[in-house]
Amino acid sequence: MTSTAEKVRQLAPHWAVMFVVMFAALAVVERAVGELGLALSLVIVLVIAFAYPLAVRALGVAPPVWQR
């Protein structure tokens, strides 16, 4: 069993990258189409939040906590 501190240590870099990707995607979409509403912004964030772990696993760089 992995401790909570170890899980956070493994996931912190991935969370940071995921948040940067979220902000970059929101900025690019907002620049391309103009002002985004809350609903569209939330959809973009949720898509990235669910797709990022899948992509990281597919690339083979997922932390042990995400490998199942």
Image: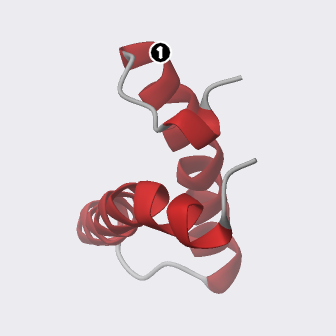
* Residue that appears at 47% across and 58% down: 11
The quadrant holding residue 49 is: bottom right
Amino acid type of the residue that numbered disc 1 sits on in the rendered structure? Ala
**Residue 68 or residue 49, whichever sits in front:** 68
Work out whether 5 lies above or below 45.
below
Residue of label 1:
58
Residue 23 placement (x, y as % from top left) = 33, 72
* Residue that appears at 49% across and 78% down: 36
Q: Quadrant of the C terminus?
A: top right
Residue 60 placement (x, y as % from top left) = 39, 17
Q: Is residue 40 left or right of residue 48?
A: right
What kind of element bears circle 1? helix
**Residue 56 or residue 68, whichever sits in front:** 68
* Residue that appears at 39% across and 55% down: 14
The quadrant holding residue 13 is: bottom left
Q: Is residue 55 left or right of residue 26?
A: right
Q: Is residue 29 left or right of residue 48?
A: left
